Amino acid sequence: MSLSLSLRSKNLNSVFYADSYHPIQAGSIDGTDIVPHDNAIYRAQLCSSIGLYDPFGDSKATGDPYCTLFVARLSRLTNEDTLRKVMSKYGRVKNLRLVRDIVTGASRGYAFVEYETEREMRRAYMDAHHSIVDDCEIIVDYNRQQLMPGWIPRRLGGGLSGKKESGQLRFGGRDKPFRAPLKPIPYDDLKKLGIPPPPEGNYMTRFQVPSPPRRERNLSDREEDSHRRGSKDRNRTKGSRKSSVDMDEGHYKRSSNHREDHSRRRSSLERSGRYHDRSSAEKEHRHRSSIDAEKHSRKRKEIDDEHSRRREKYSRYSPRED
């Protein structure tokens, strides 16, 4: 009992999204209904079972479906120029088709926007959802008409989302996902009707964004991608080798310049050292010469003094002539 209560409390804020379309499941809030609850679902189920709707039969639905977005809840006053300006914020718009009434020509409030690349489409898919255009909050989804298996449009009783006042809410899409079931799941009945069961254990939160389907690549595309990646790797290798050679050359140039600078500094130091040695030797020689001259002058003075004393003595003792 406690385990079931914990599972229910855990699933209160969990949701999941539909990968394929089934009219009966789309009319269920938790994706587990096995009986249609309004006449529109009966009509959609009939169209689905006998194949009355061809998703690729629309002559106006041109372009790459993997690069095309479905934009809904537009203002009736929004025109092609305004919508193109808004959607160009997310990438290069290749084609734009605002769906209009056949008789009156008035906007029906939704459009299809094709981008140049799939990456630009995914950027708009992530960022343009719930943005404001002409005071209306728009919703953005991928091109389910051509990419969702079993799709039935709103005019035949199918579609997704909707307003509560209409009594024809459809679940499983980006705006109104399925809630995690709080009651036992009838697996056998769902299997008989061909309805995929809820992904127990793999639920998402409302803050997580479901990823649109990706393009299936064949063998030639894979080989081309691998060849492109290989060429990029080779170019990157060549660039790295060239950069390493340039680095080696630059290192050699820097080292040679460093050696030249070192040799110049060394030679200048040696020259300054020799000049210093020569100047110090000359100073020492001059100092010694001055000392020798001073000694010689003192000795010469002593000799002169001695000679003068002798002459005085000789003159004092010598006899005088009469």
Image: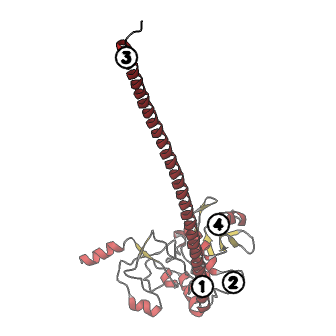
Q: CA distance from mark 3 to mark 4?
A: 137 Å
Up-down relation of residue 193 to residue 161 (above or below)? below
Pair 1/2: label in front: 1
Total labels: the figure holds: 4
**Nearest to viewer (mark 2 / mark 4):** 4
Residue drawn at 37 percent across, 80 percent down = 201
Mark toward the start of the polypeptide (1 vs 2): 2
Does label 3 or label 4 sit earlier along the sequence?
A: 4
Mark 1 and mark 4 residues within 8 Å of each other at the beta carbon: no
Judging depth in this view, the residue of 235 and 263 nearest the camera is 263
Residue receiving disc 4 = 87
Q: List the single residue furthest toward the top.
A: 322
Q: Give whichever of 31, 149 is nearer the camera.
A: 149
User: Do the residues bearing badges 2 and 3 touch, measured as CB atoms within 8 Å?
Assistant: no
Give the percent coordinates (x, y) of residue 81: 72, 64
Q: Are marks 1 and 2 in contact (CB under 8 Å)?
A: no
Q: Residue at x 64, y 68 (%)?
A: 91
> Residue placed at 69% from the left, 84% from the top?
58
The residue wearing badge 2 is 58
- In the rendered image, residue 94, in percent from the top left (x then y), is placed at 70, 73
Measure the C-alpha gap from mark 1 to mark 4. 29 Å
Under mark 1, the amino acid is Asp
Relative side of 97 to 118, left or right: right
> Which mark identifies residue 314?
3
Q: CA distance from mark 2 to mark 3?
A: 157 Å
Specify few, some or many for label 3: CA neighbours under 10 Å numbering under 14, 14-19, or 20 or more: few
- Spot occupied by residue 17 in the image (x, y as percentages of width and height): 48, 78
Three-letter amino acid code of the residue under disc 4: Met
Task: Tell me the amino acid under the disc marked 2.
Answer: Asp
Q: Is residue 105 above or below residue 183?
A: above
Which numbered tag is attached to residue 225?
Answer: 1
